């Protein structure tokens, strides 16, 4: 009996040991098989299993996590796998944009290259008469206008054409004096030399007086020949031109020096262009200029820059530049407005980038340089001369580097460029930490006053908010997504969460009606807007 019990006991022990050994072999066999499957990967389609590296912030902030999590707005962190572009982080002074977003934004780049800068300065101008070709007819003696030959302003006159006739007692007296002196010279030809010399001096003095009064040589000869003083004197045009001013009226009395006519020779005219202060350094005397007039859109008038005025108009911050134009056919009329293009001094073989590549903040000028696939490095640049399409770069970019020429402002807005710019030594170093600071969420309860789903706003009367040290008040919030207020009506009591997206901009990220139960409406902004990321 004892022997039988011993046999049974031994059998049980062997069975137990066998079971334990089978369990150990089974568990270890499964682990090795699983490891083998993982090592060889599920390679049915030739794809290897990707290795998860970390989770990144969905808004592009420099924040990662080894485990899944949500940001303060409720958006899920995005997994980053080995071999993806996002797996290679951008350096501290670079902006990182996903490849698909780069394509959506329409980003284009162009290489910085050596070019010649040919600049054209443009300005508004007006046609003026050539001041050196203006003539005033002003008698040098007192008299009366007896007759007008030209009696209309704007009338064209030829050189030597009679303008008007005058009567002057002084002129008649001077003519008689000269006639008598001239006759005395002829009468004293046989007298002694002293008498002849005295009469000759008197005649010359009378003749000089007439000449000083602008009596023509022709009239003087006629007077000497006839010996008769004329009752009136005719004034003639000194040049071909246009009567721009006429003050003479038949029968009027005039005084010495009073202007009765003004004539302008318009065979050559001036264009006075107002060039802005920043462009005046590029305009030189002798430069070629092209002038276009609205009245003649199919014509281009060309002439040289003859003078750059030495003064600046403080009101308009412009300097006048004079251009001389020939005016055959009198097409150009004083007072016309014009568009002026002047060839400026050029630079050859300088490093340039397109004008569209430069982001000018007022304090600094920045260019986005492509540092890799989806990576952009903002650089502060020092600029020089510019043409219509390109600008010289004196410092900040090297030849051959690709610079962003399209969608650079969108990259700025998309990636919060200030954070990256602060990393390359700007004086505003505090901007980068501010931009990279994590968004803080706040919780509150209140009553819905008004909903504008189309405008993306909601007005709520809320209680005190301890995290912001706010008292209770009624204020308007922006909505992260309009689905948040779907089914919600004014008067409802709600619990909500919100963040400060930008200074002074408060955005609700989740909202739950308290009186309808937590399961009725509990929208979350993160699940609606996550596809775009």
Image (cartoon, rainbow, N blue to C red):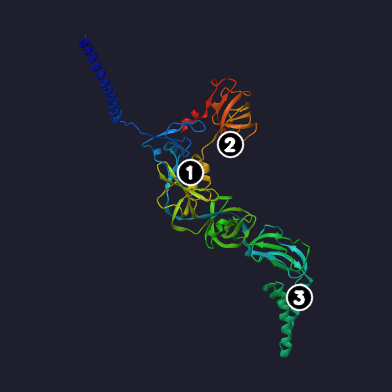
| Residue 496 placement (x, y as % from top left) | 57, 28
- Please state if 311 lies on the left or on the right of 252 as rendered: left
User: Which class describes the residues within 10 Å of circle 2: few (<14), some (14-19), or many (20+)?
Assistant: few
Residue 182 in view, yes or no: no
Q: Secondary structure at mark 2?
A: strand
Q: Which numbered circle lies on residue 149?
A: none
**In this orientation, which residue lies closer to the viewer: 248 or 54?**
54
Tell me the residue that label 3 is attached to: 174
User: Which class describes the residues within 10 Å of circle 3: few (<14), some (14-19), or many (20+)?
Assistant: some
- Please state if 487 lies on the left or on the right of 165 as rendered: left
Tell me the residue that label 1 is attached to: 408
Of callouts 3 and 2, which one flags the residue occurring earlier in the amino acid sequence? Answer: 3
- What separation in Å lies between label 3 and label 2 (alpha carbons)? 93 Å
| Residue 117 placement (x, y as % from top left) | 47, 55
Q: Residue furthest left?
A: 3
Q: 221 above or below 465? A: below
Q: Residue furthest front?
A: 2
Q: Quadrant of the rendered structure where residue 334 is?
A: bottom right
**In this orientation, which residue lies closer to the viewer: 344 or 238?**
344
- What separation in Å lies between label 3 and label 1 (alpha carbons)? 85 Å
- What separation in Å lies between label 2 and label 1 (alpha carbons)? 24 Å
Q: How many marks?
A: 3
| Residue 523 placement (x, y as % from top left) | 53, 25
Q: Quadrant of the rendered structure where residue 166 is?
A: bottom right
Of callouts 2 and 1, which one flags the residue occurring earlier in the amino acid sequence? Answer: 1
Residue 256 in view, yes or no: yes
Q: Nearer the viewer, mark 3 or mark 2?
A: 2
Tell me the residue that label 2 is attached to: 505
User: Which class describes the residues within 10 Å of circle 1: few (<14), some (14-19), or many (20+)?
Assistant: many
| Residue 520 placement (x, y as % from top left) | 55, 20
**In this orientation, which residue lies closer to the viewer: 255 or 391?**
391
Quadrant into which the N terminus falls? top left
């Amino acid at each position: 009996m004892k022997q039988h019990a011993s046999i049974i006991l031994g059998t049980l022990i062997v069975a137990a040991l066998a079971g334990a050994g089978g369990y150990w072999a089974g568990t270890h066999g499964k682990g090795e098989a699983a490891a083998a499957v993982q090592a060889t990967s599920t390679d049915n389609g030739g794809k290897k299993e990707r290795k998860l590296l970390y989770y990144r912030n969905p808004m592009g902030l420099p924040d990662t996590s080894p485990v899944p999590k949500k940001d303060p707005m409720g958006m899920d962190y995005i997994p980053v796998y080995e071999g993806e572009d996002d797996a290679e982080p951008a350096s501290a002074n670079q902006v990182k944009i996903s490849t698909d977003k780069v394509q959506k934004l329409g980003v284009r780049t162009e290489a910085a290259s050596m070019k010649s800068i040919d600049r054209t300065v443009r300005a508004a101008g007006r046609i003026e008469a050539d001041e050196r070709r203006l003539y005033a007819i002003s008698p040098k003696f007192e008299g009366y206008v007896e007759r007008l030959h030209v009696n209309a302003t704007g009338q064209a006159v030829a050189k030597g054409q009679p303008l008007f006739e005058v009567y002057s007692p002084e002129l008649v007296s001077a003519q008689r004096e000269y006639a008598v002196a001239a006759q005395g010279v002829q009468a004293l030809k046989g007298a002694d030399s002293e008498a002849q010399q005295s009469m000759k001096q008197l005649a010359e003095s009378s003749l000089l007086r007439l000449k000083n009064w602008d009596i023509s040589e022709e009239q003087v000869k006629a007077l000497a020949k006839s010996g008769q003083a004329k009752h009136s004197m005719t004034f003639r045009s000194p040049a071909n031109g246009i009567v721009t001013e006429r003050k003479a009226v038949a029968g009027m009395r005039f005084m010495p020096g009073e202007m009765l006519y003004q004539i302008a020779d318009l065979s050559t005219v001036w264009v006075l262009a107002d060039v802005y202060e920043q462009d005046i350094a590029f305009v030189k005397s002798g430069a070629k200029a092209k002038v276009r007039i609205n009245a003649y859109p199919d014509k281009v008038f060309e002439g040289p820059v003859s003078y750059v005025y030495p003064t600046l108009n403080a009101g308009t911050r412009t300097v006048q530049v004079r251009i001389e134009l020939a005016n055959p056919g009198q097409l150009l009329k004083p007072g016309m407005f014009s568009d002026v293009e002047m060839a400026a001094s050029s630079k050859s073989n300088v490093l340039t980038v397109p004008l569209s590549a430069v982001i000018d903040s007022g304090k600094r000028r920045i260019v986005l340089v492509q540092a890799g696939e989806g990576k952009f490095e903002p650089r502060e640049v020092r600029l020089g001369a510019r043409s219509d399409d390109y600008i010289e770069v004196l410092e900040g970019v090297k030849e051959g580097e690709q610079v962003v020429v399209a969608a650079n402002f969108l990259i700025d807005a998309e990636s919060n460029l200030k954070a990256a710019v602060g990393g390359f030594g700007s004086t505003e170093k505090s901007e980068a930490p501010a931009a990279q600071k994590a968004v803080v969420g706040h919780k509150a309860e209140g009553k819905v006053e008004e909903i504008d789903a189309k405008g993306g706003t909601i007005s709520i009367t809320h209680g005190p908010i301890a995290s912001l040290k706010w008292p209770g008040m009624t204020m308007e919030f922006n909505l992260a997504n309009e689905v948040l207020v779907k089914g919600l009506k004014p008067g409802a009591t709600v619990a909500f969460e919100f963040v400060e997206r930008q200074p002074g901009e408060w955005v609700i990220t989740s909202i739950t009606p308290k009186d309808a139960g937590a399961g009725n409406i509990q929208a979350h902004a993160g699940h609606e807007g996550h596809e775009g990321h």
